[in-house]
Every structure is written in structure tokens, then in C-alpha cells.
């Protein structure tokens, strides 16, 4: 049995006070239903949010990191720096980072390896564009991205990774993959993990769905066999909708 996960990617949103308030509201309202809740504020708010979550089971993620531990990388944040702030997870390879900051599969792989070295659990994002889907290249695309992100990992390391399937055409657009479309990709990925690693890894790695997840569409997604939770953008910015997703994930 894989633990359901609801992870909120706050992206470049919220002022400091708003971020702390949201974290407190989520901590106060978090249901005790066995669902793992993770929030990912911007880097400059991590220290304050970590304080707000200190006595709560809600866990903290970064939205990115550099692969080097330190050095001449202006504007970047390293794994050891995140660890100092009690960060436990790091989102890597989000499509917005691939698209706007030119992150390559190779860079994402370096970051995944570095995160694991720092005992940070990577939440590795990947997904096809609309043109990939229309050209029936969805499986080829996600398989390539996942194999590239996990290159050089042992099965033991891979079992620490969380995968997040996020079709690009569904992110922030209000268009969600249908439960059947998402399940098909998640099932396919378990096959890829089995082939690349082993059965245990394929069964252990949580695979989240992301792309316009909202309380009204989450129940039909989360009840699919191979969907273990959601990586949520817009609906994670309000405590009410995020906590509703947490309750839905606990009802399966
Ligand atoms: C995301 O950014 O990871 C995401 C899925 O955003 P949204 O839920 O807003 O589509």
C-alpha cells in the first residue's frame, strides 16, 4: 500500500505573511487521515514556513535546487542549504522550469542524484505537450523523461523518488486529463519502473497526477489504481481547497 500524497506547489505566489498564514491554516486544518501533506513555498519563504509548520505533520518542499553543494552559482540554492531549513522534498523538472529556464533532462538527473545524496526526496515532474499527445507520442515522451531523470540510480535510491505525471496541456489551463487518460500513463510508468529496476520499485514509487487538480475532479483521479495523489498548483493556494483535496485523498 502506498501512502496517498497531496503536494502543493505554490510557485512564485504569496507574500511572506500570506505564505505563513496559509501554512498555519493548513497545519491547523490538516486531517489525521494518513494522507501525507507537502507544501512548496518559494525559497525565500522556506525559513518562515518551516517555523509555522514546526509542530505539524505537514512537510516542506523546495520548488528547485542546484546540484552543487556550494560555489559560484549566482541566484541558486543548494541541497545542504535546504536541509538546514528542515526541507524534506524538492520538486525537480517541473515543466515551467524546463520551458522558461531551459532545464534539460541531464540537469534534472544531476539534481535528482544530488538531492538523494542530501537525503532530500525528489518529486520528479514530467509530461507530454499537446502536440506530443496528438501525435500519439505520450508514452515515448514520458518514458524518455523518466528514464533520463532516474539515470544512474539504484533501485534503493529510486524507491525514495516521487514521480509526478503532469501533462503540460493540463497545467494551469483548467483542462484535466481524464481519470482513464491519467491512469493509462501511470500504469505504463509502473511497467517502465519494473523494467528499469524491479517489481518492488514499481510497486513502491508513488506516482502523483498534476494538472488542474481541483476538489471537484480529484475523487475520480485518486481512485484510479496507479494514481497515488496530486501535485497541485492553483488549488493549493487556498487552505480550504487544499484541505478538501487532503480529505478526498483520505477517503479512498
Ligand atoms: C503544477 O504547477 O504542478 C500544477 C499542476 O498546477 P495547476 O494545479 O494549477 O494546474
Image (spheres, rainbow, N blue to C red):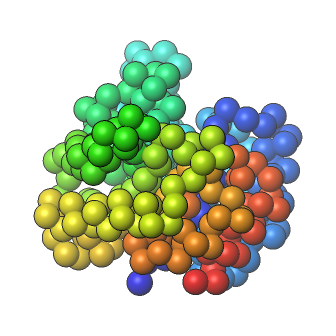
| 218 relative to 105, above or below | below
- Residue drawn at the location 47% of the way across and 48% of the way down: 166
Q: Position of residue 26 (x, y in %)?
A: 77, 62
| 33 relative to 187, above or below | below
Considering the image in quadrants, where does the C terminus appear?
bottom right
- Residue drawn at the location 59% of the way across and 63% of the way down: 6
Q: Position of residue 83 (x, y in %)?
A: 50, 47
Specify the quadrant of the image occupied by residue 200: bottom left
- Residue drawn at the location 43% of the way across and 38% of the way down: 130
Q: Nearer the viewer, residue 68 or 122?
A: 122
- Residue drawn at the location 47% of the way across and 30% of the way down: 97
Q: Nearer the viewer, residue 119 or 9?
A: 9
Res. 237 in view = yes
Count of numbered labels shown in the rendering: 0
| 161 relative to 118, above or below | below
Q: Position of residue 128 (x, y in %)?
A: 38, 42
**From the viewer's perspective, is 223 left or right of 102?**
right
Q: Nearer the viewer, residue 97 or 130?
A: 130
Considering the image in quadrants, where does the N terminus appear?
bottom left
**From the viewer's perspective, is 191 left or right of 211?**
left
Q: Position of residue 155 (x, y in %)?
A: 20, 64
Specify the quadrant of the image occupied by residue 246: bottom right
Most extreme residue toward the front is 134
Res. 160 in view = no
Amino acid at each position: 500500500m502506498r501512502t496517498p500524497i497531496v503536494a502543493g506547489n505554490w510557485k512564485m505566489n504569496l507574500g511572506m505573511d500570506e505564505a505563513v498564514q496559509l501554512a498555519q491554516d493548513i497545519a491547523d486544518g490538516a486531517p489525521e487521515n494518513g494522507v501525507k501533506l507537502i507544501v512548496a513555498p518559494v525559497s525565500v519563504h522556506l525559513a518562515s514556513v518551516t517555523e509555522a509548520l514546526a509542530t505539524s505533520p505537514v512537510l516542506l518542499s523546495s520548488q528547485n535546487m542546484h546540484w552543487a553543494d556550494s560555489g559560484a552559482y549566482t541566484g541558486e540554492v543548494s541541497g545542504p542549504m535546504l536541509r538546514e531549513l528542515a526541507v524534506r522534498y524538492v520538486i525537480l523538472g517541473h515543466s515551467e522550469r524546463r520551458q522558461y529556464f531551459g532545464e534539460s533532462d541531464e540537469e534534472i538527473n544531476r539534481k535528482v542524484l544530488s538531492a538523494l545524496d542530501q537525503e532530500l526526496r525528489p518529486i520528479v515532474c514530467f509530461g507530454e505537450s499537446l502536440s506530443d499527445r496528438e501525435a500519439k507520442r505520450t508514452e515515448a515522451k514520458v518514458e524518455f523523461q523518466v528514464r533520463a531523470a532516474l539515470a544512474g540510480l539504484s533501485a534503493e535510491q529510486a524507491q525514495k523518488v516521487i514521480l509526478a505525471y503532469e501533462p503540460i496541456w493540463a497545467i494551469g489551463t483548467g483542462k484535466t486529463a481524464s481519470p482513464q487518460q491519467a491512469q493509462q500513463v501511470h500504469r505504463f510508468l509502473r511497467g517502465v519502473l519494473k523494467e528499469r529496476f524491479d517489481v518492488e520499485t514499481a510497486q513502491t514509487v508513488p506516482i502523483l497526477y498534476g494538472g488542474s487538480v481541483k476538489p471537484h475532479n480529484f475523487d475520480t483521479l485518486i481512485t484510479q489504481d496507479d494514481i497515488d495523489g496530486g501535485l497541485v498548483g492553483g488549488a493549493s493556494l487556498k487552505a480550504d481547497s487544499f484541505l478538501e483535496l487532503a480529505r478526498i485523498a483520505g477517503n479512498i
